[in-house]
Image (cartoon, helix red, strand yellow):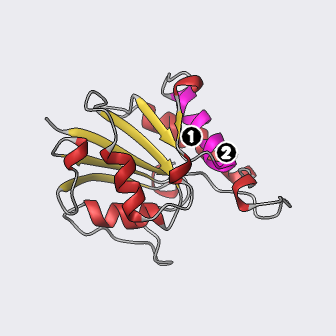
């Protein structure tokens, strides 16, 4: 049976705010504006995610909370995984392979360049990056059909249904 994997890059972060570490960087005004709109858009789509796994970095945490609210997922049910922050492709694949089989539709919230690498690695078809070379812009959502068990997920064995960026859908 197939699963759905949604990839979401956190919303736009605030580079002007002084923080001790990158991990503590919050969302910017644009991020706080785009995230609820993209979350509401996702909530109207068919087969929306029922499970959220996120990086615990502040900007991802804030994004996850906004999406959880729109998807009617209790915030206490968000799974924060330290491995997702600054994760390599292999680590992101390990996070996915560890998902319980009963989780049929999962939203993974993380960062670039890891999400770009993951999207390119999983999907058979090529995706078009923007002019700046990025696939997963801030608050972009990719919907991927995983045609295997989570533990058997493999490179180039998934189907990209859609890649939706805020500027294209809002």
Seen from the viewer's position, the closer of residues 97 and 166 is: 97
Q: Which residue is mark 2?
A: 33
- Coordinates of residue 82 in the picture (x, y in percent): 56, 48
Query: How many discs mark residues in the rendered view?
Result: 2
Horizontal side of residue 112 vs 17, given as left or right:
left
Q: Which mark is residue 96?
A: none
- Coordinates of residue 123 in the picture (x, y in percent): 24, 60
- Coordinates of residue 16 in the picture (x, y in percent): 82, 64
Q: Main secondary structure of the magenta part?
A: helix
Classify 135 as above or below 50: below
Q: Which residue, as the protein is rendered here, is positioned at the far right? A: 18
Horizontal side of residue 51 vs 85, given as left or right:
left
- Coordinates of residue 133 in the picture (x, y in percent): 46, 77
Q: Which residue is mark 1?
A: 37
Q: Residue drawn 52% across and 37% down?
A: 39
The answer to if 39 sits in the magenta stretch is: no
Element type at marker 2?
A: helix
**Residue 63, image quadrant:** top right
Where are the magenta residues, as a range? Answer: 57-70
Q: Are marks 1 and 2 in contact (CB under 8 Å)?
A: yes
**Alpha-carbon distance for marks 1 and 2?**
7 Å
């Amino acid at each position: 049976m197939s699963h759905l994997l949604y990839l979401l890059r956190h919303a736009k972060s605030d580079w002007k705010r002084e923080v001790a570490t990158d991990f503590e960087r919050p969302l910017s005004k644009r991020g706080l504006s785009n995230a609820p709109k993209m979350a509401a858009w996702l909530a109207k789509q068919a087969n929306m995610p029922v499970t959220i796994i996120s990086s615990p970095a502040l900007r991802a945490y804030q994004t996850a909370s906004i999406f959880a609210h729109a998807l009617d997922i209790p915030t206490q049910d968000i799974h924060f995984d330290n491995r997702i922050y600054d994760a390599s492709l292999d680590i992101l694949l390990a996070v996915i392979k560890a998902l319980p089989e009963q989780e049929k539709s999962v939203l993974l919230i993380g960062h670039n360049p890891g999400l770009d690498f993951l999207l390119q690695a999983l999907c058979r078809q090529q995706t078009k990056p923007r002019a700046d070379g990025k696939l997963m812009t801030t608050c972009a959502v990719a919907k991927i059909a995983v045609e295997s068990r989570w533990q058997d997920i493999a490179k180039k064995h998934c189907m990209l249904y859609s890649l939706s960026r805020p500027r294209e859908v809002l």
